[in-house]
């Protein structure tokens, strides 16, 4: 096939993650060889691509999924497994800029995203996903951020009708986390946690069992328009289809076929560590409610307890490869919150790419009459990407679903694109400085 590969696919590393170490065995999918016909060819077998394949097939159409590596190799297998009904842009900010009607629509979309994860887990019987919906606590590290968090929570109750949100004092957060460093916080119900790789593999297995063709180690090297359709070419084959969905998110630059999407995204490396299993008495002391937790610093850290291990993650890991400096910084931050973990070894360290956008929300829709996409989840992709598969299927059917601010026509290219990496470093460095001095 024509086109040029930009990577050695067999040499692409897997994440040294807790998820990889504890996941169910992966189903083997074939490598594409020869030609296939489909109604829709989907590039990427992450949550977006697999959910889209599922919902397209339910519509009576025939999708084919092409994955450059193996399902779950990218962000869908490297994330923290946190499920939240939010965007990086707050609903209050949306209301201020775009009005109440838009804010309510975005609120609906956010909550629909968490609900669809539960629906898919139930529909495919993915018990190994270990889905919980215990809620999330935003823990404040000083009085200023606590007041802001309480003000936001009160606004959500008053204007969005979110009556289940609950304010926590210092004692309440200490009981939730086992840590004394926070001054208070806010509990948001409905959020939760999941084993992200088991969820992904359960989706892939379930979709395949229902007759959808998935091909692994089949990177799309070229997209070529032909009369009445489009051809996706791989090293050993091709898929002819009426439409194509690009579902590659922060890994869009793996080949030139999807690299155009990268100019709308700012890849930001998110790093995570997981401890060895804790002694039972210590595990019972830290995060006993099974919720997920974030803090209010600009360079947000998040943490959760999984199988008697503390998982601790955050942004600010620079470069394209794993960084020991980033892992060391995470461990230092973790011990700062949980001094009891000072002598506990780390068992796993891994990272992945978060796709940020200029306006802090994902985008979905059409690039042209044959090409659709969804990406840019800004660190909240487990739930949102699962939902976007449903909306992509609607676009494929010729519908125009109301996606609010996620409309592709609102998407902006990154200005001065070649300077994005030094710009990210500069901004992140400034945020780290402000966090360090308590601002």
Image (tube, grey):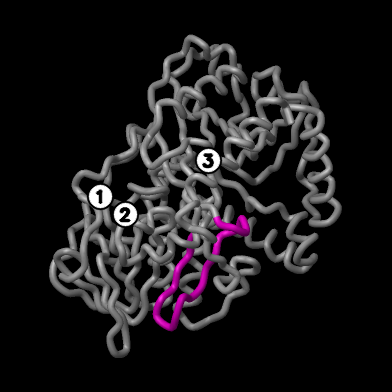
The residue under label 2 is 205
Occupied quadrant, residue 178: top right
Occupied quadrant, residue 6: bottom left
Residue drawn at (16%, 69%) of the image = 237
Seen in the picture, residue 294 relative to 249 is either above or below; the reply is above
Residue drawn at (30%, 82%) of the image = 225
Q: Is residue 128 visible?
A: no
Of the image marks 2 and 1, the number of the one nearer the N terminus: 1
Q: Is residue 22 left or right of residue 329?
A: left
Give the magenta range: 357-375
2 and 1 marks in contact (CB < 8 Å): yes
* Of the two numbered discs 3 and 1 in the rendering, the one whose residue sits closer to the viewer: 3
Of the image marks 2 and 3, the number of the one nearer the N terminus: 2
The residue under label 3 is 425
Where is residue 411 drawn, in percent x and y? Answer: 56, 67
Dot 1: what SS?
loop
- Gap in angstroms between the C-alphas marked 2 and 1: 7 Å
Q: Characterize the local packing of mark 1: few (<14), some (14-19) or many (20 or more) Cα atoms within 10 angstroms.
A: few
Where is residue 268 drawn, in percent x and y? Answer: 49, 45
Q: Is residue 150 left or right of residue 126?
A: right
The residue under label 1 is 27
């Amino acid at each position: 096939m024509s086109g040029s590969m930009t990577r050695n696919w067999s040499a692409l590393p897997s994440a040294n993650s807790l998820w990889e170490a504890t996941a169910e065995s992966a189903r083997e999918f074939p490598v594409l060889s020869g030609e296939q016909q489909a109604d829709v060819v989907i590039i990427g077998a992450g949550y977006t691509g697999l959910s889209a394949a599922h919902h397209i097939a339910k519509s009576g159409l025939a999708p084919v999924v092409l994955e450059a590596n193996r399902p779950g190799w990218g962000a869908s297998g490297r994330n923290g497994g946190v499920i939240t009904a939010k965007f990086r842009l707050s609903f209050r900010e949306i209301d201020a800029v775009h009005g109440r009607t838009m804010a309510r629509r975005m609120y609906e979309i956010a909550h629909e995203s968490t609900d669809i994860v539960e629906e898919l887990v139930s529909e495919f019987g993915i018990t190994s996903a270990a889905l919980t919906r215990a809620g999330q606590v935003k823990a404040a590290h000083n009085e200023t951020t606590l007041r802001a968090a309480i003000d936001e929570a009160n606004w959500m109750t008053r204007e969005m009708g979110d009556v289940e949100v609950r304010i926590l004092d210092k004692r309440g957060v200490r009981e939730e986390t086992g840590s004394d460093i926070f001054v208070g916080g806010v509990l948001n119900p409905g959020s939760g946690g999941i084993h992200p790789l088991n969820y992904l593999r359960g989706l892939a297995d379930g979709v395949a069992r229902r007759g959808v063709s998935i091909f692994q180690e089949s990177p799309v090297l070229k997209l070529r328009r032909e009369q009445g359709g489009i051809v996706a070419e791989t090293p050993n084959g091709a898929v002819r289809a009426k439409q194509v969905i690009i579902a590659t998110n922060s890994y869009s630059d793996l080949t030139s076929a999807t690299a155009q999407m990268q100019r709308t995204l700012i890849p930001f490396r998110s790093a995570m560590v997981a401890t060895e299993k804790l002694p039972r008495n210590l595990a019972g002391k830290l995060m006993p409610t099974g919720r997920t937790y974030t803090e209010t610093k600009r360079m947000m850290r998040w943490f959760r307890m999984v199988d008697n291990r503390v998982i601790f993650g955050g942004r600010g890991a620079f470069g394209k490869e794993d960084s020991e400096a980033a892992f060391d910084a995470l461990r230092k931050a973790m011990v700062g919150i949980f001094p009891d973990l000072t002598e506990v070894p780390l068992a796993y360290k891994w990272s992945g790419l978060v796709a940020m956008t200029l306006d802090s929300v994902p985008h979905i829709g059409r690039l042209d009459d044959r090409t659709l996409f969804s990406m840019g989840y800004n660190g909240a992709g487990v739930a949102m990407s699962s939902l976007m598969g449903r909306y992509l299927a609607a676009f494929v059917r010729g519908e125009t679903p109301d996606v609010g601010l996620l409309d592709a026509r609102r998407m902006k290219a990154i200005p001065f694109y070649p300077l994005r990496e030094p710009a990210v470093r500069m901004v992140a460095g400034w945020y780290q400085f402000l966090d360090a001095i308590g601002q």
